[in-house]
Image (cartoon, rainbow, N blue to C red):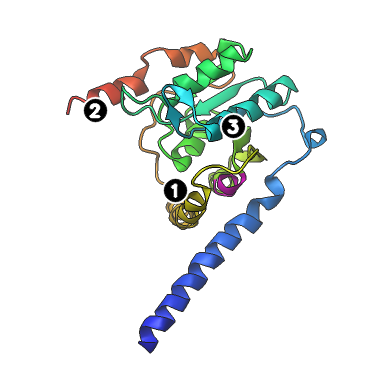
Amino acid sequence: MKIIFRLLIIIIIIICGINLYIILSVNKKIIKTVDKFTNDYDCIVVLGAGIRNNKPSPMLEDRLLTAIKLYNKGVAPKILVSGDHEYIDYDEVNVMKTYLKENGIPSENIFMDHAGLSTYDSVYRAKKVFKANNVIIVTQKYHLYRALYIARSINLKANGVSATKRRYFGQTKRDIRELAARIKDFFKCIRRPDPTYLGEVIPIQGNGDKTNDWNTTKVVFFLSQMT
């Protein structure tokens, strides 16, 4: 029993230590006041969350509203929405783009990353596929630490803005799950593997409507459903 107890203590120390390290290492990257923004960001990266009946969930809506506010203040000229569109019948990114367009953001300034299947994939692809060098990441604060840590690990210059505007249903469960997710991505960032999908390069400086088409990445998704 003593050995098991000691092992549990060690595991708890490791979990707490890694989580604390991630939070403290990027805490200063979170911007709280608009006055601290510069105008040299390539884009605002909005990380995906759930959708309901082809509408953003409350959590996702708050991320989109935060991005709209930043865009309208001239923080960055483009918005990159990154989420899950691996399956034809589940499409976070088009829901996100539609919401942004309905709120006055020009379609050509909205890029969709259909292969943002995880936080790691979304951040990695922002750099490798969309050739972003300096970004603002928008998500809820509990999630922002991990996203910024991943960016730092792949040498993507990034700051973050919290989209936390309320207490979300099921948040306690998310907070607990995030503890494990930070551990997973901590070790993933040491290995730095490629994301699930890469695909063709689509520079963020171009026209976002290019991501509306059935490009190479989306064809891969389609074919994957046939296997």
Q: Magenta stretch: dominant SS?
A: helix
Image quarter of the N terminus: bottom left
Q: Secondary structure at mark 3?
A: helix
Packing grade of label 2 (10 A; few <14, some 14-19, many >=20) is few
Q: Is residue 109 left or right of residue 73?
A: left
Residue furthest right in the image: 35
Horizontal and vertical percent position of residue 99: 54, 18
Disc with the residue nearer the chain's start (3 vs 1): 3
Residue 25 in which image quadrant: bottom right
49 part of magenta stretch: no
Q: CA distance from mark 3 to mark 1?
A: 27 Å
Q: Identify the disc placed on residue 192.
A: 1
The answer to whether one can see residue 42 in this image is no
Q: Looking at the image, is mark 3 or mark 1 nearer the viewer?
A: 3
Disc with the residue nearer the chain's start (2 vs 3): 3
Q: Secondary structure at mark 1?
A: loop
- Image: magenta residue range: 141-146
Q: Residue at x 47, y 77 (%)?
A: 9
Q: CA distance from mark 2 to mark 3?
A: 30 Å
Q: CA distance from mark 1 to mark 2?
A: 24 Å
